[in-house]
Amino acid sequence: MRHDYAALAVELADMAAADHRAAVRANSDDPAEQLAWRRLTARHGDRLAEIMDEYGWPTAQLVGEEAARAAWLIAQHADRQLDVQRRALHLMQQAVSAGSASPRELAFLRDRTLVNEGRAQIYGTQIAGVKNGVPIPWPCEEPERMNALRADVGIEPFDEYVAKYSQA
């Protein structure tokens, strides 16, 4: 079976663009907006599952940087589809081991999946909320090692990371 990687790249990029346009709905006070966000991310998660069945993980070598990043974003936002997130995490781990995916993006997906499973995260990339204007991460397995682990995968120190979100 011949794969049409160019068409897949366009489809993934279009999905990421739709995700970006709709992301404001995720935290809306309007339940209809939240539902629209959930519908979009579920549809994208379902499609990513089909893509992984047919192509494996869509690496930059196959679909280009933009589409590979789009696949990661879609997996990141498949929060109510743990099977999709776990599968993406597994395939992405293999791709990182082969040098064909981003360790930084993998770290974000690993943390997101752990938090969605109700477990402590590793890299402190997932923010639980804001208290007194300061972003608070979900609990971390080893908070004292968090910045060293972040540095290992190319993520800035936690304080620099959250400073981007704390600007009032």
Image (cartoon, rainbow, N blue to C red):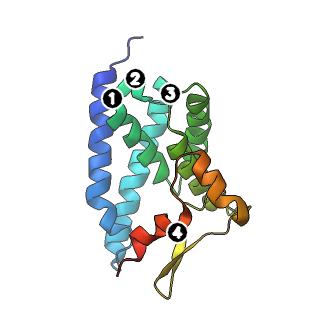
Residue position marked by numbered label 1 in the rendering:
8
Q: Residue at the far bottom: name it.
A: 132
Amino acid at dot 2: Leu
Picture layout, residue 104 above or below residue 25: above
Could you give the CA–CA distance between mark 3 and mark 2, rounded to whole angstroms?
10 Å
Q: For numbered disc 2, what is the local secondary structure?
A: helix
Amino acid at dot 4: Asp
Residue position marked by numbered label 4 in the rendering:
159
Q: Earlier in the sequence, mark 4 or mark 2?
A: 2
In the rendered structure, find residue 40 and report the number of the disc placed on it: none
**Crowdedness of circle 3 by 10 Å Cα count: few (<14), some, many (20+)?**
some
Judged by depth in the image, the label closer to the viewer, 4 or 2, is 4
The structure residue drawn at horizontal position 32% and vertical position 37%, both measured from the top left corner, is: 66
The structure residue drawn at horizontal position 39% and vertical position 48%, both measured from the top left corner, is: 43
Give the number of callouts. 4
- The N terminus - image quarter: top left
The structure residue drawn at horizontal position 71% and vertical position 59%, both measured from the top left corner, is: 145
